[in-house]
Image (tube, rainbow, N blue to C red):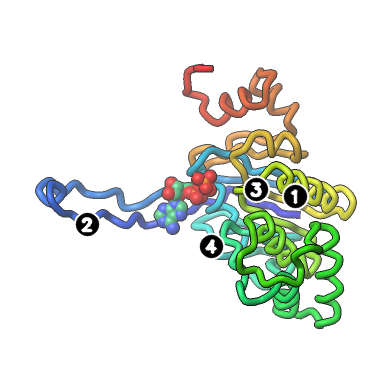
Amino acid sequence: MITIDRVTKRFKAAPAKASGLGALFKRPAAAYVEAVKGVSLSATNGRITGLLGPNGAGKTTTLRMLAGLFAPDSGGIDVDGIDVTRAPQQALARMGILGDAHGLYPRLTARENIVYFGRLQGMSREAALARSEALSDLLDLKKVIDRRTEGFSQGERMKTALARALVHDPANIVLDEPTNGLDVLATRSLREALRHLARDQGKCIVFSTHIMQEVEYLCDEVVVVSRGSSVAHGSIPALKQQAGQERFEDAFVALAFPDLKETA
Ligand SMILES: Nc1ncnc2c1ncn2[C@@H]1O[C@H](COP(=O)(O)OP(=O)(O)OP(=O)(O)O)[C@@H](O)[C@H]1O
């Protein structure tokens, strides 16, 4: 179970170096970027919760705070009741995180990458090896499991990184735009795996995306994020009803951009 309660985060904006005309006018740069202004989310076990928002809405920043990479300026995040800021190690042990950079070791095989990560999580070599076998079945990695990851396709890299994130069998799974760069078959097999993990294994899954279809295929619950804030949440039928729209895409646009005139 993951709870994000009204988190905010701003970053110091790196000012552009004044040169040429800029040096003449010396326009003062904005000092801060308000990346997240108030995002809340409540994700329960056995369900898939989507963080849906346009580019720059604040999804990745929110997930990075959930992963303990930096603390929110205000608000709170807890995982199975553990405060991520106060006890990051304990909270991280309960999460499998697939970030935007997969960062595999190219000289290690897929299996070695997975087992190494398991060892870092405190697993015995035998347990990590057994788990790598089970995950290779689940994620259809058998053909490449004993190949060095150097030269892997995007899909193979993503699956290996996901297997690595799941090696310690975490109760909570967090994925940042997991289908980025995947073809239709790889996307379908990832969806199937995520459904299995939520429905059959009771995992709490949170993923971010800007792809409407992803959300329609997968999510039990959706949090719509726009301009740094969560602006609506609920099931897809509930969000359509709330927006008074039949198509989910229209509902999303109405909820995320209420001031936008209808163009389509
Ligand atoms: N380290 C940083 N320094 C300055 N600004 C940042 C930093 N990280 C994010 N931002 C800004 O915060 C805003 C939100 O970015 P974020 O990456 O969280 O959005 P996103 O919803 O994940 O977008 P996308 O779908 O395009 O990946 C953007 O305007 C981005 O430029």
The amino acid beneath tag 2 is Lys
Image coords of residue 114 (percent x, y)? 73, 71
Do residues under tags 3 and 1 come within 8 Å of each other at their CB atoms? yes
Q: Nearer the viewer, residue 44 or 166?
A: 166
Of callouts 1 and 4, which one flags the residue occurring earlier in the amino acid sequence? 4
Q: Which residue is mark 4?
A: 71
Do residues under tags 4 and 2 come within 8 Å of each other at their CB atoms? no
Mark 2 close to ligand 1, CB under 8 Å: no
Q: Which residue is mark 2?
A: 17
Name the side, left or right, on which 255 lies relative to 114. left
Q: Secondary structure at mark 3?
A: loop
The amino acid beneath tag 3 is Leu
Neighbourhood count class around disc 4 (C-alpha, 10 Å): few under 14, some 14–19, many 20 upward: many
Of callouts 3 and 2, which one flags the residue occurring earlier in the amino acid sequence? 2
**Quarter of image, res 149:** bottom right
Mark 2 or 1: the one toward you: 1
The amino acid beneath tag 1 is Leu
Q: Which residue is mark 1?
A: 190
Residue drawn at x 71%, y 71% as measured from the top left: 147
Neighbourhood count class around disc 3 (C-alpha, 10 Å): few under 14, some 14–19, many 20 upward: some
Neighbourhood count class around disc 2 (C-alpha, 10 Å): few under 14, some 14–19, many 20 upward: few
Of callouts 3 and 4, which one flags the residue occurring earlier in the amino acid sequence? 4
